[in-house]
Amino acid sequence: MKDLLILEWKKFKSNAVFRVLALIYILLAPLIILAGKDLIKDIPPPFPSSKNFYEFPTVWDYQGYVGNWLVPFCLGFLIIHMITSEVSSRTMRQNILTGMTRKSFFASKLLSLICMALIATFLYVVSTITIGMIHTEGFDLELVFDNNWAIIRFFMMCVGYMSFALLLSFVIRKGTLAILIYFFYLMILEPILMSIHVYYFQNSSRNYWPMNCIEDLMPCPLFRMPDYFVNKEWDFSLLLTYGQAMGMSTLYITLFLGLAYRSFMKNDI
């Protein structure tokens, strides 16, 4: 396992795309929440005070929501690049022909995915605790870690987005096309399908679309606020509960990884 990670590091440590995307994420993930600090001092009701963005325990939710934007753009893109670039440069084919098994190659990408998710989660935890400590008066450990499993939810969110990117990479194998389909589904197709679902069925099953389940692991905290953010004509919540989101995300992650593995093992290299 260690050798596979070292091999992946050697492959991509000098790659320009890898460096740029990793640097963007490392710089923005901890700090982007602070960028609007002077712009949102006075928020009118019914919105919460801007202090909630930076104080314990709510800082866990707002910082997690920042990650919900950065992870699919930076880390999802990076997973696609790491796989499809090996296809286009034929290094995947070369590795397998020179003795690396398909299982080992797939395992190397899966380990890279998990490692990136762990690093992203570590940055999330450190930045959240640091921001919270600076802005919260009289905090204690109980308040600091009163976060409704936020650390686990953030890790699952990272794995979820990257697992979907991994699946598209192994199925499509062409970098530009895989990236276009990835963002098209995330930003356009699934929201359209969910809107159609609501129009025809108007029930909570619309919440169980795959990317929505993953997004609801770290949703916009404002959508969890009471009545004034809920359309009274709907008889369902805008968001899944954290338990539902974790359960469904686990199911989809397993499905994505299983399909990616099946596709890679069956297709020609």
Image: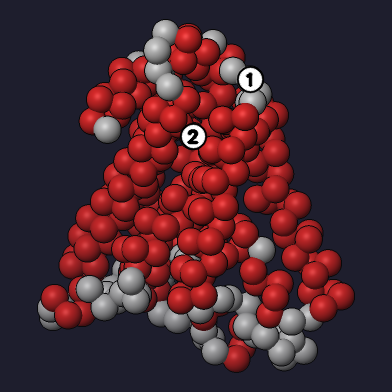
Q: Residue 35: x, y in percent?
A: 39, 54
On the question of residue 57 being in view, the answer is yes
Q: Residue 133: x, y in percent?
A: 18, 67
Q: Residue 109: x, y in percent?
A: 42, 32
Which of 201 and 232 lies nearest the eye of the viewer?
Answer: 201
Image position of 251 (left or right of 37)? right
**Residue under label 1:** 268
Image position of 121 (left or right of 202)? left
Which of 56 and 98 lies nearest the eye of the viewer?
Answer: 98
**Vertically, is 185 above or below 65?**
above
The colour scheme of the drawn protein is: secondary structure
Indicate the secondary structure of the residue bearing disc 1.
loop
- As drawn, the label of residue 79 is 2
Q: What type is the residue that disc 1 sits on?
A: Asp
Q: Residue at point 68% right, 80% down?
A: 204
On the question of residue 13 being in view, the answer is no
* N-terminal-most mark, 2 or 1: 2
**Vertically, is 201 above or below 15?**
below
